[in-house]
Structure formats: structure tokens, C-alpha cells
Image: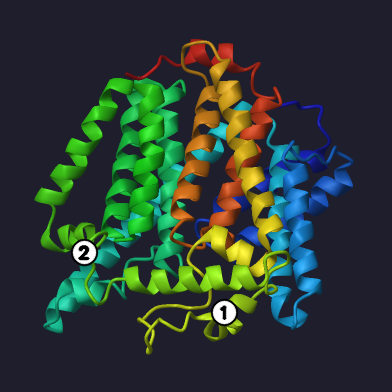
Amino acid sequence: MDSSEPLLFRIARWLTFGSAVAILFSIAASQILLALALVALLLSGGRMRLPRIWLPLGVFLLGTLISLALSPDPGAGLPQVRKIYVFTMLLVVFSTLRDSVVIRRLFLCWAGAATLTALRGLVQFSHKVQDAHAQGRSFYEYYIAERITGFTSHWMTFGGQEMFALLTTTAFLFFACVARKRAWVWLLCALLMATALLLGFTRSIWLASAGAGIYLLWFWKRALVVAVPVVLLLIALLAPASIRERFSSLLNPSKIDSNQHRIVTWRTGLAMIRAHPWFGLGLEEVGLQFNRYVPPDIPRPLPEGYYGHLHNIYLQYAAERGIPTMLAMLWMLGQILWDCLRRIWRLPPGRTDLKFVLHACVAVVLGTMIAGCFEYNLGDSEVLTMFLVVVGCAYAAMDGAIDRPMDRQTKEAPAVA
């Protein structure tokens, strides 16, 4: 870090750092720190920067505002307009976190914070096992509606945050320069996070973590990828009955699983898109108008579940904001993947923090896209905040800001494995 930087700029950096870590515990604390970081950055006179995805992001946000303006009830969509504030996290991260040491510490703080959240989740799980037994109920039937949440308010948020932290920690272990004597700490954190994800029973997170994990494994030690099906099979066969039942519910659901509920939301979303392809129904109108678009061949009452959104980011954005806005979001995600992978392919062999950050970003984007097929994950401010932090750090790396310290770090810390 440059000691000649203005004091307010350094304050902005640490407020940004604090906001990025606080999101694992409190959205209110994170957003207060984000506001203070924006003010400090503005007053510091430092350069306010956006990464090269500013164009697709700008088109996406413009499409969001157009959808609001054309909505039958613009007032109902104001919560989504306020969520645009969350996107300023990308600006402050890319503008202030320009040092490899800071980025490294941020992701390790995520590992520690997510491990604490995982431990809280494991304690919650033990209590829920006891509660189900005390009530004389089937644990599976009881637990599906009462899953662990850690420090969050919902198991989907818990799963999304734990997945991001697990993926960044795994990328750190695979690709960064890690001192051997400390590697066991981060490996233990990863194992605890993985256990919490498994016991979270959120199938979209399982699929997304597996898909993104295979990507990381492929670039680390390609031969080990063939062992993944064996490991998954062993988990499915040797895990407790409730976990085996959750695995089997992917293809053979019971009446309490959400498979039929999601089919209803997806078919209804397609009907909404056909009726309003260009600008969508309007912000927050999907939930308000859901019953109007349910296909007539779907029997009533509808399967039990939440019908406030479509449980799919692609259908949700297309139905709510129009196909062009959804395509702008896909453009942004594709641009991130292309930029990171293109830079990775040009890197020489060996471990560096640059390689770790770029692989972590690709894994997080892939995990987001896979989970987004089954859940409206980017509509969750906590998950969106972590996503933007990872992307901002990756573009800081690609901007050349953390290329220079690599040789020094490589000499200081021997590689693991």
C-alpha cells in the first residue's frame, strides 16, 4: 500500500473492506459502511473507477429503470430501485482495493467469517434434530421448512454466502502462495463450510458448488476430476437417510419437495414473457400479477411454495424487466467469464495471487449462473454484494494492480501441495 495516499482514500479502502466482510453478519452494517466508503472516496479526490463491464451493467440498470417507468404501479417497484445502491459496491471495491495484500486478507476474512457462520449453522442443525425428535416427526418433513440459516434470515442466503466463501477459499488453497504451516487452518475452514452446505439441504447450492468446484479442480489437478462422481456416489450411499432422500428428490421428489412448485413458477414466467417480451411486467409485478398468468392446465390449488418470484434469474429478469434487459445481464456475466479466462490462459505456470483471484471469480460466476437456474439469487442483497466484491477484486487484478507484488509473495511463501 502506498503511504503517500490521502488519508481519506485509505479510510475509504478500509470502510470498503469492512463493508465487504460485514455482509456475512449484517446487511444493515454492511450498507452503512458502504455509504461511508462512498463519501470518503468522493471527499478524498481519488479516482472513481468502474471495470470494463460498465456497459452491460449500465444497459441492465437502464432497462430496470425503463421497466419501472412503464410499470402499471411504479411505486411497487421502488424496492428494486433502492437495490441499485448495492451495485455501488462494485465501484468502491474496484476504486479502492488496489493491493494484493488487502484482497488476500479480504478473502481470508471471508473464510473466517463463513466458518463462524457454518459453526452456528451446525449448532442450529443439532437443535433441529432434537426438535424433530421431541415432536415425534420425520426429520426430513420437519427440516425442509426449518433449515439452518447461520447469521442470515433464510437458508438460501446462508447457502449462497457459504458457497461463495467456500469457492474463494478453495481457489486460495489451489492457486495462491500459501505457507504450508498455515494451510491446515484454511483447509479446516473449507471442510466446515462444505459440511454446513451439505447439511443446508439446498439442492441448487449443492449443484452450483459441485459445478464450480469441478471447474477449480480441473485447473488445479485435472486427473482428480474423474474421482468426483465416485465421491458424490459415496455421499449419496453412505450419508444419513435424510441426506440420501434429499439427493434422490432431485429426480424422485416427495410431496413436500419444491420440484412441482418450481415447474409452476417457470411455466408462469414463460407466459409472462410471451405477453410482455420487451419491457416486462414491471418491477415487483411478477409476484403481484402471478395468478393472472398461471397456465390454465395447471390444477388448483397450486403446490405449496413461495410465488413472489420465479425461482430463476433468467426468467425473473425477462418477465419483470424484459428480454433485452435479461440479455444485458447475460452479456455482463459472459463478459466477466471471458475477461477472467482470457487472462488466466495467458498466465505462466505456478501459484500467484492473481491466478487465485481470477479462478475464484470464474468459480463464483459459474456457481451463480448454475444456482440461478433454480433460485433468484442475485435478487438477494447479501448474495449480490458478495458477488460484486469478487468481480471488483478480479477486475482490479486484471487491471494490473496486483501483478507487481506476485514475485515478492512467491518468494516469501512456499506453495502447498
Question: At x 50% / y 13%, what residue is drawn?
Answer: 410
Q: Nearer the viewer, mark 1 or mark 2?
A: 2
Question: Dot 2 surroundings within 10 Å: few (below 14), some, or many (20 or more)?
Answer: few
Question: At x 17% / y 47%, what residue is drawn?
Answer: 235
**Separation of disc 1 and disc 2 at Cα?**
28 Å
User: Disc 1 designates what residue?
Assistant: 287
**Sequence-first disc among 1 and 2:** 2
Relative to 395, say whether 414 is above or below: above
Amino acid type, mark 2? Asn
Q: Is residue 170 visible?
A: yes
* Quadrant of the drawing holding the C terminus: top left
Say whether marks 1 and 2 touch (CB < 8 Å): no
Does dot 1 land on a helix, a strand or a loop? helix
Relative to 81, say whether 225 is above or below: above
Q: Quadrant of residue 243?
A: bottom left
Does dot 2 land on a helix, a strand or a loop? loop
Question: Dot 1 surroundings within 10 Å: few (below 14), some, or many (20 or more)?
Answer: some
User: Disc 2 designates what residue?
Assistant: 252
Coloured how? rainbow
Amino acid type, mark 1? Gly
* Quadrant of the drawing holding the N terminus: top right
* Residue 126 percent location from the top left of the image: 21, 66
Given residues 366 and 9, the one toward you in this image is: 366
Question: At x 17% / y 73%, what residue is drawn?
Answer: 139
* Residue 179 percent location from the top left of the image: 40, 21
